[in-house]
Amino acid sequence: MKSKWFGVALLALGLGVGGAALAQAGGWGQGDGNGQGGWWGHHHGQGMGQGMGKGHHGQGRFEVIDANSDGVISDDEAAAQADQVFAAMDSDSDGELTNEEYMAVRMGPGDGMNAERQKMMQDKKQARFTEMDTDKSGKVSKAEFMAGAKARFAAADTDKDGKVTPWEFRAQHMAN
């Protein structure tokens, strides 16, 4: 089964999961120093290689999605990230997310010690799963997941220029 360590940054933008979904883009490896050894990089030392966050606790979500580091998230970058998140969440690689697969990813940054906040985040996440399951099959297909990600990107892009700025990203995160 694939690791459930996704900083789920897309989720912060709501691009597929809401709150924060960073798929592990580079897989497991060696990563020395800040930002490579834990949830959103708040641990130091050896840890996961590419794919986890940069910076400290909560920083770097935007930068991970902004693959070309131009200071904005394009629709192509958002789509690529959503595709990676879907692949990482689809633990049995059958092209569909069950509710169990979707809910297995813990929401948001931090160590999960605030039970009230975690329940709130899980409740929001459950609502997003239900919303994405447009055919009411009890599963979310890749097409449904990507359509949900596209809709959340469009909602975040408040000036409709096809890009999400850090300000738009933060506003979307706060709304979700």
Image (cartoon, grey):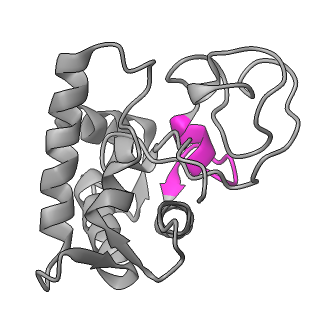
Estimate the x, y position of residue 26 in percent, counting from the top left.
Answer: 76, 54
- Residue pictured at 82% horizontal, 17% vertical: 45
Q: Residue at x 57, y 27 (%)?
A: 39
> Is residue 66 depicted above or below 146 in this figure?
above
Identify the magenta region: 61-73
How many numbered marks have been drawn onto this rendered protein structure?
0
Q: Is residue 152 left or right of residue 31?
A: left
> Residue 55, position in %: x, y?
66, 22
Instruction: Confirm whether residue 176 shows in the render.
Output: no
Quadrant of the rendering where the C terminus is positioned:
top left
Q: Is residue 94 above or below residue 148?
A: below
- 119, above or below 88, in the image: above
The image position of residue 99, as x and y in percent, is 26, 62
- Quadrant in the picture for the N terminus: bottom right
The image quadrant of residue 93 is: bottom right
What is the residue that sits farthest to the front in this orientation? 1
Reply yes or no: does residue 131 show up in magenta. no
Residue displayed at 75% across by 53% down: 27
Q: Is residue 69 magenta?
A: yes
| Residue at horizontal 57 percent and vertical 52 percent from the top | 23
Is 58 placed left or right of 157 in the picture?
A: right
Query: Could you say which quadrant of the image residue 48 lies in?
Result: top right
